[in-house]
Image (cartoon, helix red, strand yellow):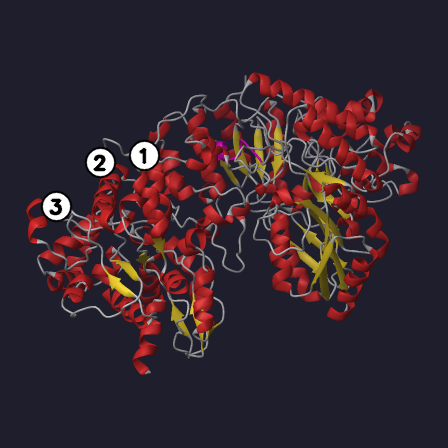
Amino acid sequence: MTDHRELSAGLRAAVRGEVDFGTTARALTTMDASNYRRVPLGVVAPRDADDVAAALSVCRTYGVPVVPRGGGTSIAGQATGTGVVLDFTRHMNRLLSLDPRARTAVVQPGLVLDRLQEAAAPHGLRFGPDPSTHSRCTLGGMIGNNSCGSHSVAWGTTADSVRELAVVTPRGDRLRPGRAWAGAPTGLRELVEGELARLRTGFPELPRRISGYAVDALLPERDADVARSFCGSEGTLGVLTEAVVDLVRAPRARALAVLAYADESGAAEAAAGLLPFGPLTVEGMAADLVPAAADLPRGGAWLFAETGGDTAAEARARAETIVRAADVVDALVVTDPARQRALWRIREDASGTATRMPDGTEAWPGWEDCAVPPARLGGYLRDFRALMADHGLRGAPYGHFGDGCIHVRIDFDLLTAPGVARFRRFSEDLADLVVAHGGSLSGEHGDGQARAELLPRMYGAETVALFERVKAVWDPDDLLNPGMLVRPAPLDTNLRFSVLPREPVDVAFGYPADGGDFSAAVRRCVGVAKCRTTSVSGPAVMCPSFRATGEEQHSTRGRARLLHEMLAGELVTDGWRSTEVRDALDLCLSCKGCRSDCPVEVDMATYKAEFLHHHYAGRRRPAAHYAMGWLPVWLGWVARTRSAGAANALASVGPLAHVVKRLGGIAGAREIPRVAGETFTRWWRGRGAPSGEGKLVVLWPDTFTEHLSPSVGRAAVRVLEAAGLRVALPPTLRPGGRPVGDARSRSALSLLAARRGRVCCGLTYLSTGQLDRARTVLRRTLDLLEPVLATDAPLVVLEPSCAAALRTDTPELLHDDPRAARLAARVLTFAEVLERHAPDWTPPVLNRPVTGQTHCHQHAVLGEEPDRRLRAAAGLTGELAGGCCGLAGNFGFEEGHYEVSRACAEDQLLPSVRKAPEEAVVLADGFSCRTQLEQLAGVRGRHLAEVLAAALEKE
């Protein structure tokens, strides 16, 4: 048995990169994006090829297997292993050179595809293959799996774009695989020359044959291309350290023909007929994967046929030619790049969207990418649907119809023995069906553990035996990724679900979308790793802490993996008390970006609150949880004692402020925000009788508006009343009757029995995981609001984070109180209430550009379209940045978070403000966003209500 400490020490002595045998590193690499889980001994992040060779030498000495890993987005299990994982994303992630004239690039295996595309784009070039995970998959992983993507009908697979490789063999040889037997290991040529007949007859001819080893690429008539034969070997033959890849000329303009058909079979049968017109893509998907609001032509299934040209007119003409040639129900040609991106996003997110059936049932990969000859796709899909029905299974096929490659996630029951047995029977039957149609078990993602066991059904026993001999030539010690491709592990073993608890975990939130099961909520993360995207476009938010740190444990996926291992109890053994999970969640900003941007809607902010609730149960919490978690209480005391001036003076005296921050767990670099001398409700009581005769709206005096930014509340009242609405504040007493009160309402009779209180969304308690306190506060709020809930008056919430807490967290935490759902349904944003209840009001027109950032909770929970329309009506032009400001309530104030908070602001918010014209209006609806702008950039951001109110004053 291997001595892990001795192995770790040996690696540390031999390797200059990081060697980590800790719980967190191992937990983060137990899974990829497949159904499988294998626990490694440790992780090595090599710095160069010498490190790779050294690590292989040490592992060979100890007989420990090695698994190369890139982005960890593989769907068949090949990026998991029980030995040492080589992580190439840490250091070996560079673009070494790019030659525009030769149209080549030299890349390291950990380079993310989008980084190569960005470097090639200024030269009018691109790398041809583009999987939907292009923003986080690595070139090494693409070569290992022979990845393809949506443009393969034009530019082929990764193997078609590989010119030469640099490989370290398990025994330390440095090879340069290329054409004409270049870089072949000793014995490979002799093996191939003895099997020429088999190689010429035993491999089906189709564009997406990825299964098995590409030994036929070594035929003399195919130029004995050793580099091509290495592609798709899934890390089982050698370790890639460098690659020379070909680039293609990118079309200067593109158009997208969206072709609608009555059903999926009609689309599938039409796809092959479009290929003679030279499209760049022919992608297909049916209505069961398309959001109801998607702007698509009428139909039950669609083909996306992209065309290119030197001009927009040329690209459009080619798209229109395809439309005329296609027998369609309806069609649409899109030339606007932004609209094309929006449509492609529907297709790219399908890998996550497909993980849930319309009724919420979980669906899984395993038969994610079979491929058949394109002309047989229609018949294959009909047979495939029938086979699923015979096994009582459901799935929503989509994918690369032009190449005959279908993606699908199926509602396998992988939690029970009968369900796993059915998974095996279906897999065997489907393999036979694919072979009957002349297809390949894998058309893009590789065989891994999911399909390798069934390769004899596709190739026959003798060809599979040839694969084993090829493996033995390259890797005689079976050191690299054992259990994949040859001598595979059974497809129904190592399932990642088998270690999870079978009984529901006792939790505080209701998890309504997961049947109340926290394990099911954690299972949502299937590993597609959209959270590992290193840059955001448009309004996207997820995942700011990963972009700031570049570390897997600070991505949504990394945190989900640690929670999975916490529930499993094998690696993370101390459950809710786990320090590993706590540390990973520590840099989660609770921005909720993953709730909307993750294709499977992982809600890490909720999981973090749940974890903190259990982690600190019965224990002392960090000082910041008391200082900022109880902020409504402290500010309430300041207001009641009218001591805002004293508090501000204290915060402005350096030594005293330092002591306060030290005691409160607040970062020393932070300034303590000033408390308003007059609260919003005190101003409200002294302003005289409200004006407005229209619809009654109840304005929510959130903690930030009430105590820190009352100007926002005053501005909102000004605008709402100008729009003809009648404004009231929520009751502060719970009376016996049911009149709608406001902050000035008093009744002599009710005063005798009423209880005094203030409404609160509980946000600060939620974000710090003080869920018992949050429940108490929210139940008191519901008691106070009963008179309001008895009417049809909407609740207008100015602070986006408070509105999001009321709309989502409240009903999920108080899932046993029907009033919570009624309250959530009443919550409207400032823009929403004007749009719904003052539709005829015209705002003042400013005719100025805007800059700033959409609040992350606005983007993730509330929606921003009403705000866009209101800004447009007011003549406020331009787009707001995405991402997160980085302050995020208590997060950016807490000790140890300042640098990450600043890095998050520098990701999107601060650059967008710096680049804005001088006359631009800086919009920031959230108090955190405004505070971050002021403290880091000296810029005053304003709520949209303040901007409109100021314009009204000038009229």
Residue 220: x and y in percent read 92, 39
For label 1, the SS is loop
Q: Which mark is residue 620?
A: 2
Q: Residue furthest bottom?
A: 955
Callout 2 crowding tier (Cα within 10 Å): few <14, some 14–19, many ≥20: few
- Asked whether 25 falls inside the magenta stretch, the response is yes
The span from disc 1 to disc 3 (Cα, nearest Å) is 23 Å
Callout 3 crowding tier (Cα within 10 Å): few <14, some 14–19, many ≥20: some
Relative horizontal placement of residue 744, taking residue 43 as reference (left or right): left
| Kind of residue at badge 3 | Arg
- Asked whether 313 falls inside the magenta stretch, the response is no
Residue 638: x and y in percent read 13, 57
Residue 134 can be seen, yes or no = no
Residue 427: x and y in percent read 69, 25
Part of the protein shown in magenta: 22-32
Q: Quadrant of the C terminus?
A: bottom left
Residue 807 can be seen, yes or no = yes
According to the image, label 3 marks what residue?
755
